Amino acid sequence: MEPAPNDSGENDEQYGSFTTGGGDVVVYDTDNPEAWLQSSYAVEVGASSERTSA
């Protein structure tokens, strides 16, 4: 499993992500190798000003 490419050319982000061969998304903390989560479902999250309350 390879990390997603970093288009900025810098590697100073605290969080990274990649997609497994099975299509799951893994999000991880680059500072703590034990902090990660894996999901078969992902959604894009917008800025808090774009959210509406129910």
Image (cartoon, rainbow, N blue to C red):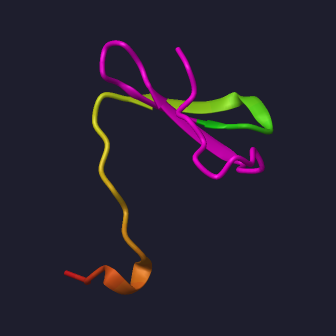
Outermost residue, left side: 54
Secondary structure mostly taken by the magenta-highlighted segment of the chain = loop
Using the image as rendered, state which of residue 7 and residue 35 is in the foreground. Answer: 7
x, y (%) of residue 8? 64, 52
Residue at image location 53% in from the left, 36% down from the top: 17
Question: Which range is magenta?
Answer: 1-27
- The part of the image, by quadrant, that contains residue 35 is top right
**Where 20 sits versus 50, above or below?**
above
Confirm whether the magenta stretch covers residue 7. Answer: yes
How many numbered marks appear? 0
**Where 34 sits versus 51, above or below?**
above
Q: In the displayed structure, does residue 48 sit left or right of residue 27?
A: left
Residue at image location 30% in from the left, 28% down from the top: 40
x, y (%) of residue 39? 37, 30
Using the image as rendered, state which of residue 10 and residue 41 is in the foreground. Answer: 10
x, y (%) of residue 15? 64, 45
Residue at image location 39% in from the left, 86% down from the top: 49
Confirm whether the magenta stretch covers residue 15. Answer: yes
Q: In the displayed structure, does residue 19 sit left or right of residue 3?
A: left
**Where 47 sits versus 21, above or below?**
below
x, y (%) of residue 53? 26, 83
